[in-house]
Image: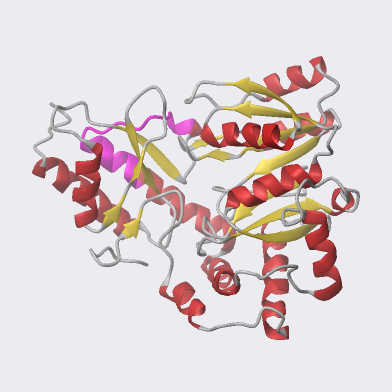
């Protein structure tokens, strides 16, 4: 596991993440984008991603160049017809982004808002779908990384399925570490990216789309490059990407997926992150720093921490001092209180998290910030 240094700090962020030396090593070879060897890598990656969600029998994996948000927009633009109506329950910045994408694409959208420390209620989804039969799709964020909240996906999926609607899941910060089983959690599309819990590098997103839905999506897309149906059809015919692929990113993801499997798959990856999360919350609590969310809705991915209420505290100075200790933190994203965020995912374990807590303790002492007092 990675060790923090000032030259190679550990990224305690929501992505990009700290990666393994083997994953970085995989990017040192150049690949021809139409070469058969590279196409085999793409095929292997697509199959492996489907297996993680137990979706190989029912879904197709469509990769796409760009950040995860590219794939979110591609999924909405391809899967939701132009006369569709999307319900977006919102309890953070990434739910809000989905609603904004719908507006940009001219898709009708309805929202239902929650406080930033409140999980989405399946009962509310049930009520809203009962009240408006025009809603065709529900788009939900599984782990809302603006706070670290984990929404009750399986219960939401069952409600959406009961109403015969289509579920689109933004699983950007959960896929590969928090279980989403297509056999038990019905969904039409699940979106994630290379640089999150799989511990690859950023630059590629992917969408797991129900095969029967994907087959009916021709002509929906507003954009040529973001047309998942066209990308899928071309890949099925040729095994190639339509446009220049991020070859080094795909090779790194292939290596990261092999490590994911060798570690013990989703269960082991999730257990390591959960252990990191517990150590982080307990360790910072001992320093007098309180986490924002109650533990029952805290995802083992990233933790929002209340900033010290002290005259000496300044986030940028705090950030810079922790960076000098070999760790990169992340600013808060809440609108109501001042916070910062600490990630639990990436190629590090208990030793790395203990070192991070010690670094934060050192910096608080250096800045003469006594939180407990």
| 19 sits to left or right of 78 | left
Of the pair 274 and 231, the residue shown nearer to us: 231
| The stretch drawn in magenta includes residue 291 | yes
Q: Is residue 338 above or below residue 14?
A: above
Q: Quadrant of the N terminus?
A: bottom left
Q: Quadrant of the C terminus?
A: top left
Q: Is residue 217 covered in magenta?
A: no
Please tell me which residue lies in front, 3 or 313. 313
Q: Is residue 41 left or right of residue 357?
A: right
Q: How many marks?
A: 0
Q: Position of residue 240 (x, y in %)?
A: 76, 73
The vertical placement of 295 against 241, above or below, is: above
Vertical comparison of 62 with 210: above or below: below
Q: Is residue 232 left or right of residue 337?
A: right
Give the magenta part as a residue range: 279-296
Specify the quadrant of the image occupied by residue 31: bottom right
Residue placed at 27% from the left, 35% from the top?
285
The answer to whether one can see residue 173 in this image is yes
- Colouring scheme applied when the structure was drawn: secondary structure
At 50% from the left and 62% from the top, the residue drawn is: 199
Find residue 119 and report its image quarter: top right
Does residue 184 appear in the picture of this structure?
Answer: no
Q: Position of residue 51 (x, y in %)?
A: 71, 62
Closer to us: 84 or 225: 225
- Up the image or down, 96 lies above or below 219; here it is above
Residue 140: % across, % down: 66, 35
Q: Residue at x 66, y 46 (%)?
A: 72
| Residue located 86% across and 21% down the image | 133
Residue 8: x and y, percent? 30, 66
* 285 sits left or right of 370 in the view: right
Residue in front for this viewpoint, 71 or 325: 71
């Amino acid at each position: 596991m990675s060790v923090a240094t000032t030259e190679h700090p550990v990224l305690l962020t929501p992505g990009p993440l700290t990666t393994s030396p083997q994953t970085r090593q995989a990017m040192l070879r150049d690949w021809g984008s139409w070469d058969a060897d590279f196409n085999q890598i793409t095929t292997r990656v697509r199959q492996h991603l489907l297996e993680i969600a137990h979706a190989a029998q029912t879904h197709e994996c469509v990769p796409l160049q760009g950040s995860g948000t590219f794939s979110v927009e591609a999924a909405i633009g391809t899967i939701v017809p132009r006369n569709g109506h999307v319900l977006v329950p919102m309890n953070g910045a990434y739910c809000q982004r989905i609603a904004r994408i719908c507006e940009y694409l001219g898709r009708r959208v309805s929202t239902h808002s929650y406080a930033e420390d409140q999980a989405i209620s399946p009962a509310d989804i049930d009520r809203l779908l009962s009240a408006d039969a025009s809603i065709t799709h529900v788009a939900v964020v599984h782990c809302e990384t603006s706070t670290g909240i984990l929404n009750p996906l399986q219960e939401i999926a069952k409600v959406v399925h009961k109403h015969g609607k289509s579920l689109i899941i933004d699983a950007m910060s959960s896929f590969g570490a928090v279980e989403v089983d297509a056999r038990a959690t019905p969904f039409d599309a699940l979106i994630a990216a290379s640089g999150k819990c799989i511990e690859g590098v950023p630059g590629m997103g992917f969408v797991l789309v129900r095969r029967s839905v994907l087959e009916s999506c021709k002509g929906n897309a507003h954009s040529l490059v973001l047309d998942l149906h066209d990308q899928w059809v071309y890949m099925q015919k040729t095994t190639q990407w339509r446009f220049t692929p991020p070859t080094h990113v795909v090779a790194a993801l292939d290596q990261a997926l092999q490590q994911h499997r060798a570690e013990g798959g989703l269960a082991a990856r999730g257990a390591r992150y959960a252990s990191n999360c517990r150590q982080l919350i307990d360790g910072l609590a001992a320093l007098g720093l309180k986490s924002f969310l109650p533990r029952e809705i805290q995802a083992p991915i990233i933790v929002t921490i209340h900033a010290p209420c002290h005259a000496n505290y300044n986030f940028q100075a705090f950030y810079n001092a922790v960076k000098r200790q070999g760790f990169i933190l992340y600013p808060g994203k809440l609108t109501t209180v001042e916070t910062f965020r600490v990630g639990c995912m990436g190629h590090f374990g208990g030793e790395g998290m203990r070192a991070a807590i010690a670094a934060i303790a050192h910096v608080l002492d250096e800045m003469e910030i006594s939180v407990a007092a």
